[in-house]
Amino acid sequence: MSTTDKISRKKAKIQSKGIQIPQDLIAELAAQFNAPSIKTGRFVLCLESPENPDELIPIFIINGKHSSKSPLHLVKNNSKYEVWEGDEKYTEVKLIPRPKFYDHFTSDGVPMFNVGVIVAPGHMRSVVNQNCFYYEIGKPCKFCAVRYWWNSKIQKTPTQIYEVTIDGFKEKVIKHISLTTATLNTKGKGLEDLLETAKLIHHKANIPIMIEFEPPADYAILDSLLQEAKKTGVTTAFCNIECFDNHIREEIMPAKGKLQIAAYIKTWEKCLDMFGKNEVYTVVVVGIGEDNNSILQGIEMAASNGVITFLVPHSPAIGAVFENMDPPDCERMLYLYENAVNIYRKYGLDLWATKAGCARGGAFSAIKEVDKFGI
């Protein structure tokens, strides 16, 4: 029966299919739990760890158009929440309680849940600026919906994010954070704003910080910014290539895809010099037209350079060019996860050693569960 599926398979399947949520539950989840953006299809469910019932395994879900066809749906059974597949219970799920800071406001009157959100127990994520330059010039990445990410303020100030982080830190619901940005038309491509934010936070709280950015063209500027990052509490860097397949990079990323893979390798090297082993990552999105060989060869190349590839399934989001696509099949994701884990081990890389960000939080991918529990 499906209920005997391993935790890694359950997570991969739920992310692939999405979950239909009855309208009468949406308001309840938004008001009582960590689901401030559930009306836009973005939310987090959790599974109990098979090793420790007090440990929650988060699953980040994007319910785009594809989710209307999902066989999975959420059911409330007395005080418990369950995911059912058709007319059969698939698994029980847990929900992260609504943090108190979601009901607070920044000093300039912005609801804090519009600035930063909890994406896994202890993990806050904020997209500092969602006004991508590539959208402005009519060349957005076709899988990207950064302008519609969460139910958030499109452009946040460092002060707003600082205030939210400190509020959540005092509440003990924030233990590490991710700061990311759309690509901006600046010398650092938006990295400057991330570091200004990190600097404010670092003065008040010793919180590990992940930054996520695109390689700047000027490596002297990159060196300077990374040195500043190290001084301001940044422990982890994500420099995301998105797709290793050179046959389609420019087609699906008309602007970003022009940046050569060699530029990423050089940027990764500089990040490794600054942050060290197991703290430098690149994200690859699975299911946007690439083949498996390009992914596995790319993971091997990155790992040989000391970089961990964080595989995430494409969850087609409303607002993206690719909003009508279907996500990659669960079986494909598990195959890639398993092979990726073997490559990490070959090069002595450890997903579980990371101090901050998406890899530590783990909500966006089932790869850590495959690493720990198998498939």
Image (cartoon, grey):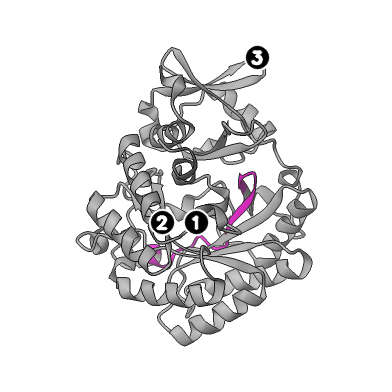
> In the rendered image, is residue 256 in sight?
yes
Q: What is the quadrant of residue 304 in the picture?
A: bottom left
> What amino acid type is highlighted by mark number 2?
Tyr
Judge depth for marks 3 and 1 and give the one in front: 1
Under mark 1, the amino acid is Asp
Point out residue 235 in the picture as x, y percentages from the top left corner: 60, 67
Quadrant position of the C terminus in the picture: top left
Residue beneath disc 1: 350
Whether residue 290 appears in this view of the structure is no
- Residue 306 falls within the magenta-colored stretch: no
- In this rendered view, identify the residue nearer to me: 207 or 274: 274
* Vertical side of 27 occupied by 355: above or below: below
Whichever of labels 2 and 3 marks the residue nearer the N terminus, that label is 3
The residues bearing labels 2 and 1 have C-alpha atoms spaced at a distance of 7 Å
Q: Please state the horizontal and vertical placement of residue 60, each as a whole percent of the image.
A: 51, 41
Q: Which residues are magenta?
A: 118-135
Q: CA distance from mark 2 to mark 3?
A: 43 Å
Query: 314 or 331: nearer the eye?
Result: 331
Circle 3 residue: 78
Residue identified by numbered label 2 = 344
Residue drawn at x 42%, y 63% is 240
Crowdedness of circle 2 by 10 Å Cα count: few (<14), some, many (20+)? many
Q: Are marks 2 and 1 in contact (CB under 8 Å)?
A: yes
Question: In the image, is residue 125 above or below residue 48?
Answer: below
User: Which residue is at a point 48% across and 50% down the rendered structure image?
Assistant: 148
Amino acid type of the residue tagged 3 in the rendering: Asn
Quadrant for the N terminus, please. Answer: top left
Query: Reading the chain from its start, which is encountered first: label 2 or label 1?
Result: 2
Q: CA distance from mark 3 to mark 1?
A: 40 Å
Please say if the residues under marks 2 and 3 sit with CB atoms less than 8 Å apart.
Answer: no
